[in-house]
Amino acid sequence: MNISKLHAALVTLMLALPSLLPGGTPLLEYLFEETGTTATNTGSLGSSANLTFYNSSGAATDLHSAAGSGVGGQGIAFDNTASTGSGSAGTGGRAETADASVSTNLGALKSFTIAGWFKVDTTTTFGGGQTRLLTVFTEPPAAETAAGISLYGSDAGRLTLRVNGTGFTSATAKPYYNTSSLDGQWVFFAVTYDGNQSSNNVKFYLGTETIKLTDAHTTGSIAAGSVVSSGTALTLGNNIGGSGRPFDALFDDIRLYGSTTDNSGVLSLGELETLRAGAIPEPSTVALLASSLLFVVAMAIRQRTRR
């Protein structure tokens, strides 16, 4: 038995699993599987969209969680739970690009999808609204002259997407957080925007580790056309350059897909469900990898004892 070949085959299998994700290569992809004060962008925009973690005082700080705290009890997450609350009543950390170059790359998008996971603790307090999730946007976001993309939440757990000066908010009946049925567990969120259309071009999706996506729970309209470059940095979990509107939560697998030419930046329901399910280790996959690894180890020990 050639152990090295078997080991190589196992490694190939493990590396192939992420390639099953849909929608091509995202522009932004933050998996948070590193250490230190930087979150690496593994999307197509590359290192220019890397993020630096900052605490509430504005100092660069390692805000990675402990190992095993990510979705499915796997890996590492962005830990912003040192925040004093969510919204304008709290202060907290953030993850932010070094400059505004990313806004240029996102500024001409005709369609996009933002998707990822967050986990809000059952004891988190909410106040003042405007809990910032992802922002590459001029302020104030409600101004008609505003530019860019902003995704933020209300105290009631509804998400609002703003494109340039226009926004749309998800349904009251489907809160993403600040509800006993979801707080304390990982929530999958997704919002799509098709600027090629002027109506029914925004869709919100909600799932968990155990609840599949069945359809968009809210559909609305933002007649904003293509995204206008904001000329700002991109920030996760708070205001750009500030600490006053934190999202007190863990974050994992944050992605942004987009197109500057057509509606291909909009992921379908099936593609989004594949994203959701792909973050959760399937028992069969885990069992296969574990048994294969044990077999490699056992064969290696057997060969050594025969020598």
Image (spheres, rainbow, N blue to C red):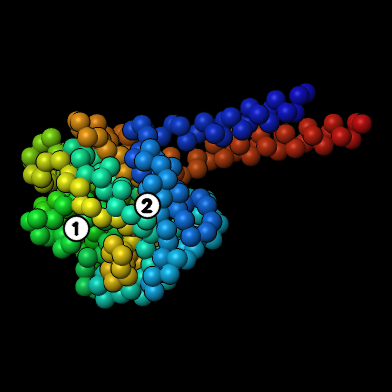
Mark 2 lies on a secondary structure that is: strand
Point out residue 92 in the picture as x, y percentages from the top left corner: 36, 70
For the point 20% across and 47% down, which residue is it? 229
Residue 269 location, quadrant = top left
Residue 227 vertical placement versus 174 (above, below): above
Q: Which quadrant does the C terminus fall into?
A: top right
Viewer-proximal residue among 288 and 89:
89
- The answer to which quarter of the image holds residue 260 is top left
The reply, left or right, for residue 183 in relation to residue 280 is left
Lateral position of residue 161 relative to residue 7, left or right = left
Which amino acid type is shown beneath numbered disc 2? Answer: Trp
Residue beneath label 1, please?
138
Earlier sequence position, callout 1 versus callout 2: 2
Identify the residue shown where x is 16% and y is 60%: 141
Q: Are marks 1 and 2 in contact (CB under 8 Å)?
A: no
Q: Which residue is mark 2?
A: 117
Determine whether 51 is above or below 202 in the image.
below
Question: Compared to 254, does 83 lie above or below?
Answer: below
Residue drawn 87% across the image and 34% down it: 304
Q: How much space separates mark 1 and mark 2, taking CA atoms?
A: 25 Å
For the N terminus, which image quadrant? Answer: top right
Residue 259 place in picture, x, y as percent: 25, 35
